[in-house]
Every structure is written in C-alpha cells, then in structure tokens.
Amino acid sequence: MNVLADLHTHTNFSADGKDHMADMCRAAISKGLSYICFTDHIDNNPSDNGYKYFNYAKYSETIERMREEFGDKIQVLKGIEFAEPHLYPREFEDVLKKDFDIVMVGIHYLGETYVGDKVISGNYSKQQIFREYYREVLKAVKFGGFDVLAHFDLPKRYFKGSYSEKEMTLEILQEMVNKGIALEINTSPLRRGFTECTPDSEILKQYIEAGGTKVTTGSDAHSCGDIAADFDYAHKLIKGFQGIPGIFKGRRFIPIDSL
Ligand SMILES: [Zn+2]
Ligand SMILES: [Zn+2]
C-alpha cells in the first residue's frame, strides 16, 4: 500500500482544531501523503464548544485556495464530520445539499454530555456507556445518508479497554453494509496510551464478514504533528483482514488500488 490518505483531520475551522489548513497541508506533504481530507466538525449539541462554530463559506474558499497552492503535491479533499444526524435532520439535510467529497458521521454525545466526559465515566459502568453509545450509533446508521462512520467504538478512547456488545455491533455493521457506509480505522487511541485503534481487529473482521467492502484510514489529527500518525499499524490491520482501503471523491468510494 503506497498511497497514503488521511481522511479524518481537523483544522482551526473546528473549535478544538489547532492549526491552519495551509500548515496541515505542508505537514501532510512532508509526511508523503497523496491525499488529505479535512473533516471539520459540525456539532449541533448546544453543550458543545463548537456549537455554531463552523463557517461553510470560508471553509470552501480556503479549501479552494489550498487546492491552488498545493494541488501539484497533494490532493485536498473536502469533508465534514457531522455529529448525531438523526437528532438534527434539518441541519443534516442542509449539509447534504452542499458540495463535499466525504460526509462522515461521528457520535459524540449521550444526551447533553460528551461521551468522554468524566461525568459519564464517574456515574456509569463501562458496559452501560458502551450500550448507550451503540444505541445512538445504531440510530444514526439506520438514519443513513452518509459515507463513513467515524471511530466505531469511541468510548474506548476514554475508558480502559473496549467492551464488546456483539449483537448490537453486528446489527450496526449489517446496516452499514446494506447502506454502503464505510468503516473508518481511526488511529487516535494509539497516541493516548491505548494499544488499539477505534475500531480494531474484532469489529473490522465482523464488518468484512458481514460483506463490508469499504475501509478508510483517519488519524483524527487536531494539529499538524498527528497527521497520519500510526498509519503503519492501521495498514497492517486492514491488510490482515483483506479489507479494501480507499478514499472518497465526490462522495464516491475509490479503492486505493485503482487510484
Ligand atoms: Zn469524532
Ligand atoms: Zn474528528
């Protein structure tokens, strides 16, 4: 696998993003990437720091400038990470009318609280948190309309060890396969002291066994230094299960082998 594509990155168009898009492009080029996709946040939960933060017009304009400036060295893809579309259908419909290469969905909130918040970890067991989280993911996947599901078992990034809820994860994965939604291998837990991606082998294997054929790689970098972090690990994982890694362009999946 010679093509490096990081399809999940954040710039300062996200409230929690640190760096300018131009610096992110320079860092990606220096790391040898062929593709970088910016997936800044649209979080509609009023409790979120990034509530109403995203500016589509400026984002589009900046991406166009990046394409002009760096287009001969790297392909810049225009994406979005939209949280809980099933709860914000009107806002999601607006996003779908716009021109994106990738519409990615991530579940971030359980009610009014962020999944990783200490209020949750202090009051609920790991099992309860994962169950609630998967319930929300299932609702989002049933709602559909998007290309990639981000960080499948996100609570893992905040609580030691994963918790497997086989029946629920299978139901989510089957729905993803039916709708053609890609599974993202998100490397962010590896730089927080964990030994697995979100998701890792167990869920990737189930996705492929359920008939899933689309896999993407994302660092979830919120600054230049984390772009494509631990991609060697992710590539080995995908290869080990004969997953088909690819990118999205104009919301169409293209396997890396046919680029
Ligand atoms: Zn996310
Ligand atoms: Zn993200």
Image (tube, rainbow, N blue to C red):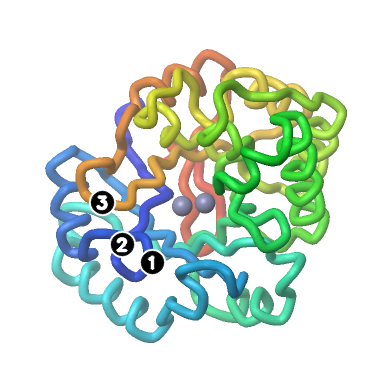
**Observer-nearest of 225 and 98:** 225
The residue carrying mark 2 is 11
For this view, does 22 lie left or right of residue 94?
A: left
Where, quadrant-wise, is the N terminus in this rendering? top left
- Tag 3 and tag 2, C-beta contact below 8 Å: no
The residue carrying mark 3 is 223
Q: Does the residue labelled 3 lie within 8 Å of ligand 2?
A: no
What is the x, y in percent for residue 125?
73, 31
What is the x, y in percent for residue 183?
61, 39
SS at badge 3: loop
Where, quadrant-wise, is the C terminus in this rendering? top left
Residue pictured at 38% horizontal, 31% vertical:
192
Between the residue at mark 1 and the residue at mark 2, the CA separation in whole angstroms equals 6 Å
Q: Badge 3: how crowded within 10 Å, few (<14), some, or many (20+)?
A: many
- Tag 3 and tag 1, C-beta contact below 8 Å: no
Q: Establish if 256 lies above or below 55.
A: above
Q: Give the residue type that dot 2 points to.
A: Thr
What is the x, y in percent for residue 210?
78, 28
Give the residue furthest to the bottom. 57
SS at badge 2: loop
**Observer-nearest of 115 and 10:** 115
Name the mark on residue 159: none
Residue pictured at 40% horizontal, 46% vertical:
220
The residue carrying mark 1 is 14
Residue pictured at 49% horizontal, 19% vertical:
237
Q: Give the residue type that dot 1 points to.
A: Ser
Q: Badge 2: how crowded within 10 Å, few (<14), some, or many (20+)?
A: many
Q: Establish if 87 lies above or below 105.
A: below
Q: Establish if 79 lies above or below 223.
A: below
Q: Is mark 2 within 8 Å of ligand 2?
A: no
- Tag 1 and tag 2, C-beta contact below 8 Å: yes
